[in-house]
Image: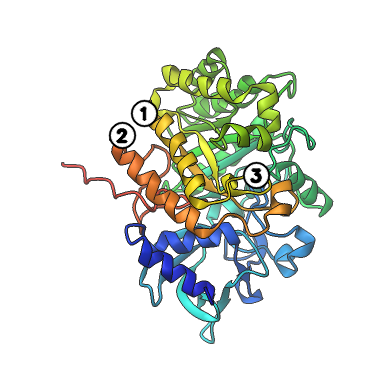
């Protein structure tokens, strides 16, 4: 294709059942977006909610490489609407790439727009600074540092442990920059708490609950790095579970409680449930057996792919199949040096995994791979996977759900183009709207 615009329009024409909004969203997520200085935030002192770096960098450059965007953070997310493609409201997680063909900038009327190949393709909305971000904890820490919100305020993201015990080239997942993200924020002198104190989390949630009078925040996710030994004397289930226990005791029923953790043995999973967790995300990362071994060496070494999958199935006996929602990283199937060479092969493999889980009533979800440059796969695949892969995955995902009679998973907000708030992939944008409830 002669231009990025031509490629995007060709895919919209070839795959008309995939919402046009999702085509643009996937391209922004896989390749990032540049920001004109006019579109950057004033950090926590401004009117725009800034990017919190809630677990990974989700950037196509290190902080020193981002220029002014490292000093004045871009917004956490952007909303696309209107323009020549008449886009419905589309929430997109911000992934900064100064060399992207997409650029957010203000026009002569100070109205933000998204530009592709130099042409304005949509209006851009940015999240307003929430009132709860304007209030500090008693120790001076910010709510954004302790309990940031994403998905346009829907989800409170509690990264309780900011590093991962799968460490080094022989254990770290090859697409993951959680450990580097920790290091770069500490090197930049930014506040970035390694292990969050339970009382700090509760205090931050009290502030959110007090000032979120519209009850926009609906769910919280407890997550962080894998724990292969112990942290503060606790194994993974007890370490993350203690936060859920405290939250549910202090705020019973206020939020949907979710935990992203390893695929743990059934007794450990039961402890999550006993602590008050409602949704369990034991991420399977990538389906193909060989790629799992090559790209998730720590998980293969400590647990193994087959055992990982058995544990996911076992966890449905604790949470129910509908509340077990494993994530995979969409795009690493095509990452060199070991990934599939064609989109056909990659889609066939991913669909095999979808059919495996959905045949058991489990609805996986996915995050669109961002090739962060400090990761092994980011270094060898700076452009990520082809956009066609991501568009065909949306088509295959929806079709497989329909084949097994499944609906959108709980805890992700509303489905449907123009309604979805899930910001790190388009799977919710691509699903049908929920049928209206009869009163």
- Residue 390 numbered mark, or none: none
Q: Nearer the viewer, residue 394 or 207?
A: 394
Q: Residue at x 56, y 37 (%)?
A: 286
Label 3 environment density (alpha carbons within 10 Å; few <14, some 14–19, many ≥20)? many
Task: Tell me the distance, in whole angstroms, between the alpha carbons under discs 1 and 3.
Answer: 31 Å
The quarter of the displayed image where residue 169 is located:
top right
Judged left or right of residue 111, residue 63 is right
Q: Nearer the viewer, residue 300 or 62?
A: 300
Helix, strand or loop under label 3:
loop
Give the number of marks: 3
Task: Tell me the distance, in whole angstroms, between the alpha carbons under discs 2 and 3.
Answer: 33 Å
Label 1 environment density (alpha carbons within 10 Å; few <14, some 14–19, many ≥20)? some
* Mark 2 or mark 3, earlier in chain: 3
Q: Residue 10's x, y, as percent? A: 42, 69
Q: Residue 328's x, y, as percent? A: 53, 39
The answer to whether mark 1 and mark 3 are in CB contact below 8 A is: no
Foreground: disc 2 or disc 3: 2
Q: Quadrant of the C terminus?
A: top left
Residue 387 sits above or below residue 238 on the image: below
The residue that label 3 is drawn on is 55
Q: Residue at x 62, y 37 (%)?
A: 291
Task: Tell me, yes or no, if residue 148 can be seen here.
Answer: no
Residue 131 sits above or below residue 100 on the image: above
Question: Farthest residue in the bottom direction?
Answer: 108
* Mark 1 or mark 3, earlier in chain: 3
Question: Farthest residue in the top direction?
Answer: 267
- Residue 359 numbered mark, or none: 1
Helix, strand or loop under label 2:
loop
Judged left or right of residue 46, residue 187 is right
Foreground: disc 1 or disc 3: 1
The answer to whether mark 2 and mark 1 are in CB contact below 8 A is: yes
The residue that label 2 is drawn on is 404
């Amino acid at each position: 294709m002669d231009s990025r615009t031509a490629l995007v329009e060709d895919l919209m024409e070839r795959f008309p059942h995939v919402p046009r909004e999702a085509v643009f969203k996937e391209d922004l997520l896989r390749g990032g977006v540049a920001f004109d200085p006019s579109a950057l935030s004033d950090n926590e002192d401004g009117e725009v909610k800034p990017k919190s770096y809630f677990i990974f960098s989700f950037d196509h450059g290190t902080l020193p490489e981002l220029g002014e965007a490292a000093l004045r953070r871009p917004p956490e997310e952007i909303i696309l609407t209107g323009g020549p493609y008449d886009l419905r409201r589309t929430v997109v997680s911000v992934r900064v790439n100064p060399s992207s063909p997409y650029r957010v900038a203000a026009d002569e009327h100070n109205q933000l727009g998204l530009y592709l190949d130099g042409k304005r393709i949509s209006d851009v909305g940015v999240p307003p600074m929430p009132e709860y971000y304007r209030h500090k904890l008693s120790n001076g820490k910010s709510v954004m540092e302790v309990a940031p919100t994403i998905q346009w305020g829907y989800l409170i993201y509690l990264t309780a442990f900011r590093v991962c015990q799968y460490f080094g080239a022989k254990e770290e997942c090859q697409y993951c920059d959680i450990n580097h993200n920790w290091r770069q924020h500490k090197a930049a002198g930014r506040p970035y708490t390694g292990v969050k104190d339970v009382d700090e989390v509760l205090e931050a949630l009290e502030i959110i609950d007090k000032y979120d009078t519209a009850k926009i925040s609906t769910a919280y996710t407890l997550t962080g790095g894998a724990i292969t030994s112990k942290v503060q004397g606790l194994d993974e289930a007890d370490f993350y579970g203690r936060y859920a226990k405290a939250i549910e005791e202090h705020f019973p029923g206020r939020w949907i409680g979710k935990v992203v953790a390893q695929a743990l043995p059934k007794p450990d999973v039961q402890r999550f449930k006993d602590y008050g967790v409602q949704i369990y995300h034991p991420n399977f990362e990538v389906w193909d057996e060989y790629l799992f071994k090559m790209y998730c060496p720590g998980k293969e070494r400590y647990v193994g792919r087959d055992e990982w999958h058995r544990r996911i199935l076992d966890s449905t006996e604790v949470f129910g199949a509908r509340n077990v929602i494993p994530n995979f990283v969409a795009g690493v199937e095509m990452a060199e040096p070991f990934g599939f060479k064609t989109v056909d092969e990659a889609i066939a493999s991913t669909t095999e995994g979808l059919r495996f889980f959905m045949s058991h009533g489990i609805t996986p979800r996915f995050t669109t791979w961002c090739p962060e440059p400090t990761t092994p796969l980011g270094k060898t695949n700076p452009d990520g996977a082809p956009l066609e892969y991501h568009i065909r995955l949306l088509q295959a995902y929806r079709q497989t759900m329909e084949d097994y009679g499944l609906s959108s998973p709980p805890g992700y907000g509303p489905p449907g183009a123009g309604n979805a708030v899930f910001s790190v992939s388009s799977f919710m944008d691509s699903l049908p709207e929920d049928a209206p409830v009869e009163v």
